[in-house]
Every structure is written in structure tokens, then in C-alpha cells.
Image (cartoon, grey):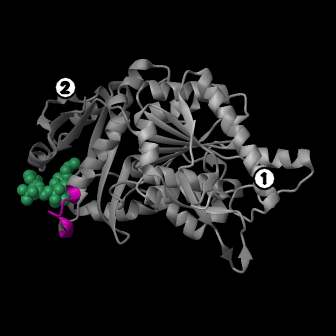
Amino acid sequence: MKPTDLRGILQYIPRFREKVFVLAIDGAIVTDENFANILLDIAVLRSLNIRVVIVHGASAQIRSLGEQQGTKPSDLFGAGITDAETLKLALTAANRLTHEILEGLSANDLRAVTTNGIIAHPMGIIHGVDHLFTGKVERVDVDLFQSLLAQGLTPVVPPLGFDGDGKTYRVNSDHVAVSLADALKAAKLIFITTADGLLHEGQLIRQMLASDLDQILASRKNEILPPEMLSKAVHSAAACKAGVQRVHIINGRVDEGLLAEVFSNEGIGTLIYANEYQQIRRALKKDIRSLLLLTKQAVDTDELVKRSRAALEKNLGDYFIFEIDRNPVACVALHVYPEEGKGELGFLFVSPSHENQGIGRKLYNFVESKAREMGLAELIALSTQAFNYFISKCGFVEGTPDDLPPARREKYESSGRKSKVLVKKLK
Ligand SMILES: CC(C)(COP(=O)(O)OP(=O)(O)OC[C@H]1O[C@@H](n2cnc3c(N)ncnc32)[C@H](O)[C@@H]1OP(=O)(O)O)[C@@H](O)C(=O)NCCC(=O)NCCS
């Protein structure tokens, strides 16, 4: 789907209307030539009644202002020590940048405002080192932000915090963004950076469960995350923990990147999602053996169709595992037929020891919300023995083999299993 495809965008409107998106924009992106396009994308979001809060960093500008003035900043990112000189640089750089963003928003007829709504206190002395004017967000003035957003204004928030004595602190902008997303119950937090997203062995990670990111951060963070992305990764995981369901990391230099990320299935960067069902995760190669073992009995009794190790491996991305204390106790698959706009829910199995605890339902809901996210129009399921379950518990109706995509129908005919075909319209 092209982001410019209006029909494609329209399907997202009810879901996002009046929801808050926090955009955390690196300072280097504000001065990039593509920033004009980002402003246009923000104007599109606003026209769809999405409430936007912009948080910006300023490290690139602090660095160059320091060079111009012959001063070496004590810290660029608002996480180390901010001495008095660096605070001055940060104030000048951040205020200029805020102003630049306000100008850009004006040029797009967007009403915007900057605030003192980030209440901070000093980071203090850590391991004997006084962090001076580096601050931590103590709280967000939620009423202030909500009333601005309700009036259709776009708050622009610099990486600075204020305390009750009128002092200013330099605060890390990723930290400000997470605090705001948490306090305003944002539907999305989008980091707009100079990198494509999180990479693994040079490959862009398209999607990642927050719990998987947590695991990486706990054990292999230096292996998988270059230092410049570590802050984004840490703050993405923190945002998911705080209840933000979707965190995106995208490259701000890609034209139409913001719209593509929000309004297309693939997106351009990395999506980190905190699922309501934390125990559901994508199956990995190392899970194939447990999947085969778990489902063996259901295959023997013809409840499930037999899948070979190679078949599982080939479409591994379609399979999900429900685990309790790291033990796989259930599984499900979503096979997508993009041409027909249909998805097939398959391989739904709950181990007998865990039946009737709502796990089947959770897996079904997970697949349905995934299918909706992908913009699929219909879900189908084939079942020999659980068709009543799909009808009475999941809202399917009985269909016919004509409902199957042609390729699937061929397999259906040749299998001779005579499963019932079940259909659920999603649109
Ligand atoms: C069908 C299945 C997935 C249900 O999983 P589960 O986690 O036990 O189900 P849930 O806890 O979500 O739901 C339980 C409810 O569904 C009902 N239910 C369970 N299996 C059912 C079936 N085969 N037909 C009709 N209702 C069924 C239960 O009686 C219970 O009803 P209640 O809410 O009124 O008490 C599971 O029994 C299973 O793995 N079956 C074998 C594999 C299979 O046939 N898969 C489908 C092919 S894709």
C-alpha cells in the first residue's frame, strides 16, 4: 500500500482519531532537508484528528554551537554531566530548534505552543559524581498538555525540564518522550532518528515484541545494538512497560517515511510492540521441535493437519507460541493471502493440561488483531473437530470451500480431510 493511497489511510482513521502520538525527533533531523516533508506528514496526521506532541533533541546543535563558541560541552545527550556552560549551550540550541519547529508548523497552518509542562529534578549524585544541571523528569503536567491538545494545538517540547524554584535542567529527549507518552497514554511513540531502526547483523528488525527486546537488553545489548541506538532501544522498552502499545523507530531522512510507518503494514523502520498478551511470541527455529511435540497428539487424532519440520521452517514467520514460564503450552498460525485480502487462522492448539483457561481465546484475539492491523478483510479457519468453538466463541460462521483462496482450495480438495470452512468478516 502506498501511503498516498487515501483509501488505505481511511481504514486507520477511526482507530487513531483523537489518540495521542508522541513524535520524538532528533535534533539532526530538524535541520535535515527532509524535515519539511515530516512537517507535511504531521499536517496529515493533524487533519485526521490525531493529537500530536513533538519532543525534540538538540545534541547535534549543542555540538555545533559548542564548536562555534570554542566550548566543549560536558555532555551532548542529557544523560551525563551538564555543567553550567553546557546548560547555556543547551538552552540556546534547544530554544532555537523549538523556534525552528514552530516556524515550520506555522508554514503548514498548524497551531503550536511550547510549555513549561515538564517538571524535572536534578539527576543528582550517582556513584559519587554530581550530574549538576542534568535533570530527570519528575512528572508531566498532564492537565496542561491535555487542554492544549483538546484545543487542537501541537505542543513542542524541548529537552529541558523546570523545577518548582524556576530552575532549568537539561533532560534527555528520549526520556522526556517516554514520560510524555506514558503520562498522556499515547497510542504511539515514534522516534524519528538518523538511523533506519534497530539492526541485527546488518538487517533491519521490522518488528519486535517488547519482551524480546527486554531479553536482548538484559543479555546481549552490546552484541546487537550499536551505541547510538541503545538509548532508543532502552527507552522503547521502557515505553512499552509503561503501557504504550506501539513504539516505532524510523529514519527521518526518508520521504513520506512517517506516513508509511503509521499507515502501511510494512512500515519503514522498527516496530516494538507491547502486546496485551505478553506470553504470545513469534516462533523461532529453535521452537520447531517443541511445536511438533506439542501438537503431535492433535495430529494423531486428525484435529490438526500434519506439518513437517521443513514446512514449519519455511513459513516460520506465520507461527506463534503461547508460553507460560517459558514453556510452550499452545500455538497458532496466521497465513496471509495478500491478493485476496484474507488470512487463515490455523494450527490453533492448546495443550490438554491448559484447556479451558481462555488461552485459545487469547490466541484467537491475537490473530484477529494482527489480521486487522494488516488490513485483512476476512479470516478463515478450517476445522474438523473444533468448528463449534470457532462459531460460538470466536464469531465465525460456516462457509463453503468457495470461500478459500484458489491455492488454498486446491490443497483443501487434495487433502481429503473434509474440514468445515469457517469465515469471519473483519470489515
Ligand atoms: C479448541 C481449543 C483451541 C480451545 O482452546 P481453550 O484454551 O481450551 O479454549 P478457551 O478457554 O478459550 O474456551 C473454552 C470454552 O470453549 C469451549 N470449547 C472448547 N473446545 C470446544 C470445542 N471443540 N467445541 C466447542 N466448544 C469448545 C469450552 O467448553 C469452553 O466453554 P465455556 O466458556 O462455555 O466454559 C482447544 O480445545 C484445542 O486445542 N483443540 C484441539 C485442536 C483443534 O481442534 N484446533 C482447531 C483447528 S485449527
| Quarter placement of the C terminus | top left
Q: Is disc 2 surrounded by few (<14), some (14 to 19) or many (20+) residues within 10 Å?
A: few
Is residue 37 magenta-colored?
Answer: no
| Percent x, y of residue 205 | 56, 48
Q: Is disc 1 surrounded by few (<14), some (14 to 19) or many (20+) residues within 10 Å?
A: some
Is residue 357 magenta-colored?
Answer: yes
Question: Which label belongs to residue 88?
Answer: 1
In this view, the residue farthest toward the right is 70
Q: Is residue 273 visible?
A: no
Image check: 264 left or right of 202?
left
- Residues marked 1 and 2 touching at CB (< 8 Å): no
- SS at mark 1? helix
Among numbered discs 1 and 2, the one appearing first in the sequence: 1
Residues rendered magenta in the picture: 353-360
- SS at mark 2? helix
The amino acid type, in three-letter code, at marker 2 is Asp
Residue annotated with mark 2: 402
| Ligand 1 found in image quarter | bottom left
Above or below, 75 relative to 51 = below
Of the pair 81 and 10, the residue shown nearer to us: 81
Above or below, 108 relative to 284 = above
Image check: 213 left or right of 332?
right
Which residue is at 21% across, 40% downward?
381
* Dot in front, 1 or 2: 1
Question: Which label belongs to residue 101?
Answer: none
Q: CA distance from mark 1 to mark 2?
A: 70 Å
| Percent x, y of residue 55 | 59, 44
| Percent x, y of residue 25 | 62, 42
